[in-house]
Image (spheres, helix red, strand yellow):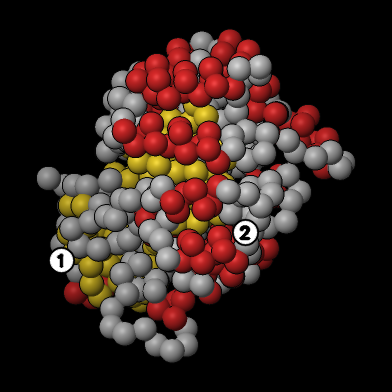
Amino acid sequence: MTTTLLDGIGMLVTNDPHGHAPSSGRDEWALGIVTDAAIVVEDDRIAWIGPAHGAPAADERHDCAGAAVIPGFVDSHAHLVFAGDRSAEFAARMTGQAYSAGGIRSTVAATRTATDEQLRAVVQGLVDELVRSGTTTFEIKSGYGLTVEHEARACRIAAEFTDEVTFLGAHVVPEEYREDRRGYLDLVTGPMLDACAPPARWIDVFCERGAFDADEARTVLQAGTRAGLGTRVHANQLGPGPGVALAVEMGAASADHCTHLTDADIDALAGSGTVATLLPGAEFSTRSPYPDARRLLDAGVPVALATDCNPGTSFTTSMPWCIAMAVREMHMTVAEALRAATRGGARALRRDGLGRIIVGGPADLVLLAAPSYVHLAYRPGVDLVAAVWRAGRRVTAGATGPAPGTGAGSGAGAGAGWSDRG
Ligand code: NIG
Ligand code: FE
């Protein structure tokens, strides 16, 4: 057993508010801020939180020198298993070309020809970026294989890095099934699901014009439910549509994108256990209007922020950047955005123990090079992540291997990046 004392924390965001919410400043109250704090980490857990002056001794000490400590980010939506490059598509969009769901097929072609080692190296590189920018839990989706073999491979590789694996065989109908949608749905809900369910925790479907309609998407989600998977939906990204209503109907953990919502969608979300996961990287990269986060928050809908890291519509791994965008472009307060990137993500993954700093909880911590969490949006594009502890271990540059506490064990040593320093 090793204990580590982090002291001199100028501002500790616990996401564990105490007492009644005040009538004003409610958003910041929810962050459960403690000033002049210290934390003791014992193995992978938080053992003690209190005032800096009363901290017990520990084996190791880290002086935070007055800086802020926040919970590690929980990125509940990322597509990391792919090959190929679509920067030309992005550049064309910036000159006015529209995004269409069909672009997914070019990544599918590149992914199918990549070796396992090549895919692993891509995932490792992106995971390193995620962790370096303060993300301590992340979801990884399949969805660029679209055959039984290639989807199963993507889920297997994803499971080397995270417990939060999502089967997204219903991303688009692949080229070879263009004239046989029914045949592809039978494949996704039959042999592909059988092959992908064991390493997966979730099933997702892209319910959108150009991808899958409501009936098709329902069929996919129902099959996933029967296979024991939780459900999530890519919903209402490119236009108004049935995705959000379907997510609520199915009791999905989250409806993701939520860019084009009707009042009825918002009412449905507000009365449900479905989180609205907002992905500002996708609107940035497709030059689309941002989702109306204020309407959602003011209606009481639980909101998560995630990167949607993927080569087509949102090639970022930076949650701090997403927070800055959510504040500037989606009118979230900085406190709301930070909470959405931590507790919101935890809720979207139904992992209630994550996204906060409490005694007995996991030691997933981020030390900022800043006196306040507000700097995450106030200093956009600046790397403010000074240190990351993941399951109690300081992660740092230069090592290789899978992240701790992921259940991920083997073969993930391809990249040179961030891992535990022990
Ligand atoms: O979340 N919307 C569907 N899937 C991805 C985009 C995939 C792609 O274009 O490669 C998304 O934005
Ligand atoms: Fe996505």
Residue type indicated by callout 2 = Leu
Q: Name the spot of residue 227 as percent of width and height, x first.
A: 31, 30
SS for tag 1? loop
Could you tell me which residue is drawn at 64 percent across and 54 percent down? 259
Question: Whole-Å distance between the Cαs marked 2 and 1?
Answer: 51 Å
Q: For the N terminus, give its image quadrant.
A: top left
For this orientation, the residue located farthest to the right is: 95
Residue type indicated by callout 1 = Pro
Q: Residue 263, can we see it? A: yes
In the shown orientation, is residue 287 left or right of residue 228?
right
For this orientation, the residue located farthest to the left is: 1
Could you tell me which residue is drawn at 28 percent across and 46 percent down? 391
Q: Name the spot of residue 246 as percent of width and height, x first.
A: 49, 48
Q: Which residue is mark 1?
A: 56
For this orientation, the residue located farthest to the bottom is: 23
In the shown orientation, is residue 246 left or right of residue 291?
left
